[in-house]
Image (cartoon, helix red, strand yellow):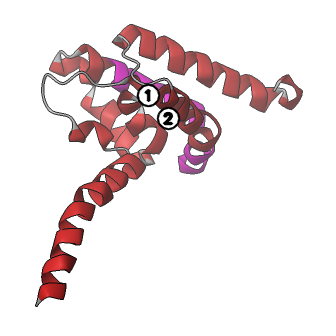
Amino acid sequence: MRRRREDRAVQAELDPVVNDAAALLSGRMAGCWGPGDAIPAWVRINVLAHGDWDQLRSLVDQGGFARGSGWDAALGFLAAELVIVAGDPEGLLTLQRSTLIPLELDMLAREPTYVTPVELVQRVRHELARAQARRAHPSAS
């Protein structure tokens, strides 16, 4: 009986960690923050760095512009850029691994980094342009 209680206590401590890890790796980290929370830049791009093709298409289709949030608009715009640049789900995975995950990790290392929607769009577009240049001219790395 004591062992079960200990197991439940350990599980109760691990559940939030496991849930956060799952959110991070599935592109749903922003959902871990509450309304009005100051959300770091790396959390803002988490959906771009880890979201699958359908998640990004959903962001595009929802057209963040309609909801009125600058962040929704920025992420919808960037998702559309990613879909265009990537071209297909395989291209998205390549772009995420080569560009967006390293960008997310760079932002995480500089914690706390808070940016405006415009600053985030500029930073991500800059990295996407660099990725396109590397693909077009591999020696440009």
For the residues labelled 2 and 1, say whether their Cβ atoms are less than 8 Å apart.
Answer: yes
Residue in the picture at 22% in, 70% down: 11
The residue nearer to you, when weighing 103 against 4, is: 4
Identify the residue under disc 1.
80
Q: Quadrant of the C terminus?
A: top right
- Give x and y (percent) for residue 29: 31, 41
- Give x and y (percent) for residue 47: 38, 38
Q: Amino acid at mark 1?
A: Ala
Give how far apart the Cα atoms at labels 2 and 1 are.
5 Å
Identify the residue under disc 2.
83
Helix, strand or loop for disc 2: helix
- Give x and y (percent) for residue 39: 28, 25
- Label ID, residue 53: none
The residue nearer to you, when weighing 17 against 58, is: 17
Residue in the picture at 16% in, 75% down: 8
Residue 1: in magenta span: no
Residue 82: in magenta span: yes
| Position above or below: 56 against 124 | below
Q: Is 121 left, or right, of 139 in this rendering?
A: left
Q: Amino acid at mark 2?
A: Val
> Which quarter of the picture shows residue 32?
top left
Q: How many marks?
A: 2
Magenta extent: 74-94
